[in-house]
Image (cartoon, rainbow, N blue to C red):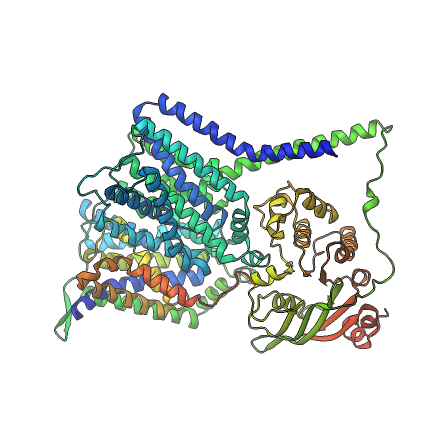
Amino acid sequence: MPHADAGLARSRALRLAWPIGVAVVGVVAGYLLSIGLSGYFVFLAVSAVTAAIAILGLGIVTGSAGMIALCQLTFAAVGAWVVSLFNVLEVPGGFVVWLIAGGLAAGVVGILVGLPALRLRGVNLAVVTLGFAAAFDVTLLQIQFPGSKDGIPVLRPEGFSTDRGYFFFSIIVLAVCGLVVFWLQRGRWGSSWKAVAFSERGTASVGQSVQQAKLTAFAVSAALGGISGGLLAGQVQLPFASSFTPLQSLALYVLAVMSGAYLIDMAIFGGILWVLVPELLKRWGVPQDWGFVIFGALGVQALTSGTNLGQGIRNLWWKRADRRAAAAREAAKADAAAHPAVVEPPVEASVPTLPTSAPRPASGEPALSVTGLTVRFGALKALDEVSLEVPAGSVMGLIGPNGAGKSTFVDAISGFLPQASGAVRLGGTTLGRMSPTKRARLGLRRTFQQDRVPPALTVDAYVRFVARRRVTAEEVAEVLDFFGCPPARTRLAGVDVGTRRLVEVAANVLARPRVLLLDEPAAGLSHEEHLELGARLREVPARYGMAIVLIEHDLDLVRTVCSTLTVLDFGRVLASGPQDEVLADPAVIKAYMGETEML
Amino acid sequence: MLQGALAGLAAGGLYAVLAVCLTLMSRLVRVVNFSQAATGMFGGFVAVWLVTETGLPIWLGSVLGVLLAGVLSGVIGWIAATWLSEADTTTRSAMTVGPLLLLISLSFILFGNKPQPFASIISGPAFTLGGVVISQVTLVTVSLAIVVAVAVRILLTRTAIGTRLRALSERPTTAELLGIPSKPLSIAVWVVTGVISAIAIVVVAPTQSNDAISLAMLIVPAAAAALLGGFKRLDLAVVGGLVLGVLSGLVAQIDEVALIRNFLPFLFIVVLLLWTQRKEVWDAAR
């Protein structure tokens, strides 16, 4: 279909071009403002731009990656300090080079402060950053900015030395920062930030290092803070510590949370609020400190309700768009019903039906072999000397009553239980004490019983993030279609949990692992969807080339899908082998199905 | 040298009291309350205003200020218990950043950003030890920290209300199903810790840098001290506070390392966290 290809190429070009287009329009608007605004407002506008860049950085750490960072203006102070220092030292290259150096320096400081945060989450990081902000503030008062004692003003970039020119310059910097953040958010890093905010286990299990995700978020955020501070140094030319107090960092954090600063437009809006609120208060003759009181109260509101302005507006917009799309579909359906002459060929033919015969076990080298796997939780032996082999290109069923140790088995194999003893070999590789991330990269993937699909992503971004390899849009569409998932453009936030877990399975299949462990993937699906998933899974080994371990309660499904079976009971392997032999085993019938039930 | 260390002990006692309150909050109502010191600061400032402007006796002004701090803390607790009862610790803690910002700014508006003329409730030396003077303030704060820690421990382990509080903190939903009034109880915890923090701040404020920022930011050394006990153990929180106070007192004596003094709580926090979190732990169960 050459026509469709051309259309696809055009839409791809458009996808690439529109952010640049927006940035160019923004810069042009900035230029017009820089010649149109009065001098006083130009100065205020630069303040808004610097605040917007700092908030943009906060949006990454607090909005996307879900960490609390309370020292954004400390990073800004680092940037301003470096710019002042380079100015005093007359480092060649001029302001632009100094600004970049300031951003980099702040990024490095961010990494240093963030290093202890690698293993930390939430509150601890907040304590670390608040402590850093408080300490740096006092120190800054003592050491001052370079050149401030002698009154050496920071030289603005050539050609942008007037206030108006400098405002235009700051708009260009903002546009560049906005573009960079946009692309980062759309890329792997952005996906990893949103994934780590939702679930660290989920992130590690798809081969993404949790530490790296946190550190990149922290570094990028700090670097943006540094650039914001450097810009401020150029704006005021003699920066003082009073522009970078912890109190302002707190206010900036609150502002970022309530505006929803992980959305670029809202970060800019936050920057405008940062300047507008005190300015309005000043005009009304109200003390400007009320500004922070307002921010504090609104911040409590935003944090308790878990909503923010930007997301609220978008949700409204999306709801309308969805309703319109649904109405259009309905209309099309009614239209088709009204004109039955146009008969479409049946598209349902591709849905496979469940075969009645049991699948045959594959032969050859095992994809996964486990020997003597033991997991203790205190006195309880959750897994006791479990040994089994998963033949390559097969589906193995792992069954057993509740509490038999099935999920513990998956956790231990995927590396989330470092206390597990025993040997696990994936293909020819011994996994030993490897981290979950490393195991996933070697080709051992798993899904979770609970929802571990980050709702902040689209289906497309999530599938690509999980796949961890270059996949074409066609491949994504194909695998989504195969599993009956919603189309790639769908936002995961608007998808029910059962379907999310289906998307999780599809994405992990697209990753083409050697072995895929599925922990009750059908929980939350309807009976029909359940059967359909079983039929798909049966095809997966041949179609995508991997072995599957399937934990499942529905014995009918197990019987039609799995070639081999392992039965766990109280952490021990009761039986393991070809399906019909295992199900005929009297011990299995007795322990698992009850004595009277006939198979 | 010893004089410096003991001079830091008064501050250390204050850190310890706040750290005990933080630990208590973390254990019982699942929050790291960033506004813990700020409510006390605000209550203290109101007490100063009552004494200097309306001429109330010092003791009455202080009591009113402390009570106000308890009420403020209770209001924040009410917000947390009403809208964030099911939220995780991080979200609940993040919410308290709002009141911290609000209270500092509000105190700037009402009282200005200068240090406040706190009248000493307690002053003068208590006794001398080996030629070094121990002030009454030091004695009171350190014993307050120990008394509060011991009292809380007895309350939690020996009394019926303590059992309820523990049930509430460990299994909030189950506790509620058992008929334990979770909301009033958790708000009560907020009020009590607010009162205790405010008492400590009012006692120590006359001898410390007592502008709004300095007092509200006491949360940083307090959190550092609480971290020694992992926000769980009261005894270690007390030890952490005292050690941190003594260390700052020592460092302040040596000019060469004076800059480090600012970073002392921060370094304390970082080292402790790296040590306690050295084993990688996964976020939620399974």
* Picture coordinates of residue A43, whole percent (x, y): 31, 30
Which residue is drawn at the image coordinates 47% and 35% (left, top)?
A: A265
| Near-viewer residue (A556 or B151) | A556
Q: Quadrant of the C terminus of chain A?
A: bottom right
| Near-viewer residue (B117 or A570) | A570
Q: Is residue A280 left or right of residue A481?
A: left
Q: What residue occupies the far left of the structure in this picture?
A: B131
Whether residue A228 is visible here, answered yes or no, is yes
Q: How many marks?
A: 0
**On screen, A168 above or below B264?**
above
Which residue is drawn at the image coordinates 63% and 44% (left, top)?
A: A460
* Picture coordinates of residue A97, whole percent (x, y): 35, 41
Q: What residue occupies the far top of the structure in this picture?
A: A36
Q: Is residue B105 left or right of residue A368?
A: left
Q: Is residue B50 left or right of residue A587?
A: left
* Picture coordinates of residue B222, whole percent (x, y): 32, 60
